[in-house]
Amino acid sequence: MAVEYLENEGFTILHRNYRFERGEIDIIAQENDELVFVEVKSRHTQSFGTPEDAMTPKKESYLKRTAEGYLFQHNLEDKACRFDVIAIEWKGERPDIRHIKNVF
C-alpha cells in the first residue's frame, strides 16, 4: 500500500525491505534528485499512539545506521537524502495514509 502511494506521488521505488547488518529500511525511493529512506508504520487503534509515535530515538538510530550502510554499499556517500514516514491508520476497512517528510 505504501509503495503504491509513493509511486502515485511520483517516487521511483529502488528497494523494498533493504537489510544491512541488523537493520532494515522498509522502502528506499528516489524523488527527483533526492534519495528517500521510508519507514512504514501502521496502527489499527491508537491504544499505543499514532503510527509515527513508534519512531523512537532507538529506531531512528537503527535507520540512520542502515542508511549509511546503503550509501556506502552503493557508493553514494555524497547523495542528498532524507528520512520519511508513511503512517497508516485503519478506520474500519479504510486506511488513512499520511506521508511525513524529513521526519528527522
Image: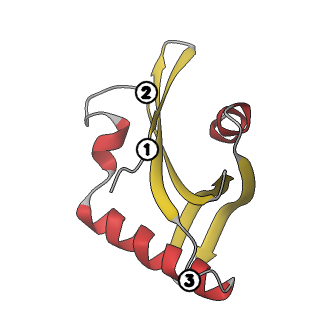
Neighbour tally class for label 2: few under 14, some 14-19, many 20 plus, Cα within 10 Å: some
Amino acid beneath label 3: Glu
Which of the two discs, 2 and 1, labels the residue nearer the N terminus?
2
2 left or right of 41 in image: right
Name the foreground residue: 88 vs 65: 65
At x 35%, y 25%, the residue is 45
Which of the two discs, 1 and 3, labels the residue nearer the N terminus?
3
Residue 100 against residue 35 in the figure, above or below: above
Quadrant in the picture for the C terminus: bottom left
Amino acid beneath label 2: His
Amino acid beneath label 1: Lys
Which of the two discs, 2 and 3, labels the residue nearer the N terminus?
2
Residue 8 at x, y percent in the picture: 72, 31
Please say if the residues under marks 2 and 3 sit with CB atoms less than 8 Å apart.
Answer: no
Please name the residue that numbered disc 3 is placed on: 77
Residue 59 against residue 86 in the figure, above or below: below
Q: CA distance from mark 2 to mark 1?
A: 22 Å
Given this view, does label 2 or label 3 mark the residue nearer the observer? 3
Residue 95 at x, y percent in the picture: 54, 20
Please name the residue that numbered disc 1 is placed on: 101
At x 28%, y 68%, the residue is 58
At x 71%, y 38%, the residue is 10
Quadrant in the picture for the N terminus: top right
Q: CA distance from mark 2 to mark 3?
A: 37 Å
96 left or right of 59 in image: right
Name the foreground residue: 14 vs 10: 10
Please name the residue that numbered disc 2 is placed on: 44
Neighbour tally class for label 3: few under 14, some 14-19, many 20 plus, Cα within 10 Å: few
In terms of secondary structure, where does tag 1 sit? loop
Residue 8 against residue 66 in the figure, above or below: above
At x 69%, y 44%, the residue is 11
